[in-house]
Image (cartoon, grey):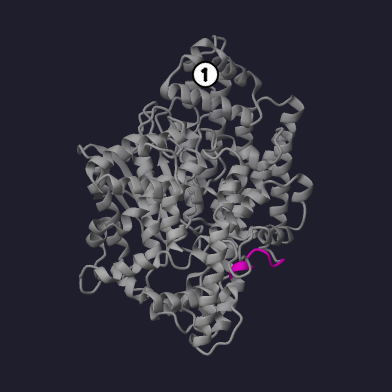
Amino acid sequence: MKTRLMAAAAPLVLGAGLLGGFPMTALAKEKTAAAAPAYTGPLAQPSTLPFHAPNFPAYKDSDWRPAIEAGIAAQRAEIKAIAANKAKPTFENTIVAKERTGQLLSRAYSTFGQLTSANTNDALDAVETAVSPQISALNDDIYLDPALFARVKAVHDSAAGKALTGEDAMLLATTYDEFVHRGALLTPAQKTELKAMNLEIAKLETAFSQKLTAATAAKAPVFDTEAQLAGLSPAEIAAAAKLAAEKGKPGKFMLALGNTTQQAALTSLTNRDSRKILWDASVNRTSGGDQYDTTGMVTQMATLRAKKAKLMGKPDFATYQMYDRMVKTPAKAMEFMNGFVPALRATQDREAGMLEAAAKAEGQNIKLEAWDWSYYAEKVRKAKYDLDENQIKPYFDVWRTLEDGVFYAANQTYGLTFKRRTDLPVYHPTMRAYEVLDADGSELAIFYFDPFARSNKKGGAWMNNFVEQSYLRGEKPVISNTLNIAPPAEGEPALASFDDVETMFHEFGHALHGFFASQKYPSLSGTNTARDFVEFPSQFNENFATLPAVLNHYAKHRQTGAAIPAELVAKIKAAKTFNQGLGLGETLEAAMLDIDWHKLSPEEAAQPPMAFEAKALAATGLSTDLIPPRYKTPYFRHIWDNGYASGYYSYIWTEMLAHDGWNWVEKNGGMTRANGDHIRKSFLGQGHTKDFAQLFRDFTGHDPEVEPMLEARGLAPEAK
């Protein structure tokens, strides 16, 4: 499984989060309380662009801090007015009133969060450092306000509250649960202690994120000669020379690091020493004892989180975090993951033997090491399936894949159409913007696509809401997908690997989840769902990438225009079950490591992080020396910054949901408009208006079943 970064900046009060990480917040018409301080900057009112899309050229780096701080002050005033209301607490004057607050902050932070993740600079990083603890303090001031909680509780416990139905009932339940989760039932002394912890955690998360981004750029390994990069394509070597020149090392070559442990070039570099250099740069980027080392921050965050869980009366932070999940407890998450271990370890051992045999066949009598795995796996894949990545890439032009593949599948299944909007400003020239029209021709959304890697961009891929759908606020969605595809050399076409292609379909699944949002309340809208449900629509949408009717529409050779040959497609599909030892193994290990980190007591969390990681990985029963986790502890952004603490298992859990869901599609006629309408009606347009298990049952008619995933992964008994 290929994970995509769906990170989150410091969480906003409106139930916001970044998929894969940025504040998916609602922007709307102002209803600022009279007591709010005057703010007249460029973000004071919603943008006049369609759907209030961000007017990027109008914003200067110096605008963000005043706008965010004004938004914080405004929301404080709005919340204070609700808490001080002398009228009897009602659903409208308390719960719904809270949903209306924070619109200036949302407007500013939704765009700022995307910029600091996708196109940052020193000035933006400084603003993020300054405002993240302020936002943490705002959240505490809201959820730990005894007068406000008294009103929320009064509505929750009232006969009128218990009589609510549908989205109203869900909003009341989730609002009350969120207050309790954030500490509303603590004593005044405990609340003071919690606020101090939250403030320190927020500072550490921001510092970790910035240091990791800087380290990933700074630790790109340098090579003296082109010969050291033998095996890479001329375009890749040219890109390495260009990067070195840009970094002040003309005549040399640099390989930019991706965010994961594995690096793309490891599949191609023929020089084993070069592979080792690249590997060491990747795994040691933030644990070398230098200015980029994050291990001390990890210790502090893990300890603080464990102390926070203890203060909240929970046995550990994982239990505390999972209060609202589809999988309710860390024990159940681990039980689910442990179920894969026996078959997966057998697969890892079997594949390791194949790779060592491949090395010996070349006259390399070596002991297989972690930096050799991808190289020899690619050789075995070529030999076993006659499949070469260089054969594949010419068929996957980035923009054609988006417009004739991703968009085409959405058109055929859901009736959507997409219109390029060159009049809408973007924050980087390699982006594109589109207007999205619904099946009836009505305006549905605005969509931005930012595909290429940059040194000032976080790794991975994610979806973000600039504007979040809400009938309460009269808002329609403005959404972006951000990826890290290797940019083309000058004059060359932008080509994607098949992994990139699947990522494009994956992130667009999140976009569809946002497009089809049809909720009154912003905190229940679209992708504002549990961590172990939100990846379901995105992984489900990956299936369209290889659907013949879709694939043949976009996979055209960049020079000849010929459709991708059926035999090449067959090879791609056949090869998908190969290298599962790495493909599933690295993700499962990372997910287990995440839970292990967040089950520690405060005393246990204080131990040296790399020593703990070694013990935790050894206990998995998997071949973690040859196949380390997808993210090692010091660069595991998902769990230390992006809101996936105790939630990385979600990628595996939702993959199960996605395979089971696609099994339903195949049994019910495939990619039809009728099925598209059913998907949209049953779960893709429902946000968090129902229990997540019920949403899945509404779609498939049954509870989740793991067998389709095992079969797809080649781990089912009959597939062994």
Read off the magenta span: 282-289
Residue at which label 1 appears: 94
Residue 291: image location, x then y, percent: 68, 64
Residue 653: x and y, percent? 50, 47
- Looking at the image, residue 481 sits to the left or right of residue 109; the answer is left
Q: Residues within 10 Å of mark 1 (few under 14, many from 20)?
A: many
Relative vertical location of residue 334 with respect to residue 195 in this rendering, above or below: below
The image quarter containing residue 345 is: bottom right
Tell me if I can see residue 193 in this picture. yes
Is residue 260 or residue 331 the one in the foreground?
331
Up the image or down, 9 lies above or below 99; here it is below
Q: Quadrant of residue 80?
A: top right
Depicted 115 relative to depicted 230: above or below: above
Residue 283 shown in magenta = yes
Secondary element type, mark 1 = helix
Let me know if residue 20 is in the magenta part: no
- Farthest-out residue, bottom: 363
User: Which secondary structure is most common in the magenta stretch?
Assistant: loop
Residue 55 visible within the image: no
**Which residue is nearer to you in this view: 710 or 49?**
710
**Residue 207 point in image, percent of width and height:** 64, 52
Q: Position of residue 418 (x, y in %)?
A: 25, 48
Judged from this view, the residue extending furthest toward the right is 603
Say what amino acid the circle numbered 1 marks.
Answer: Thr
- Residue at the spot 52% in from the left edge and 71% down from the top edge: 351
The one nearer the camera, 101 or 170, is 170
Q: Residue furthest front?
A: 718
Q: Is residue 620 above or below residue 93?
A: below
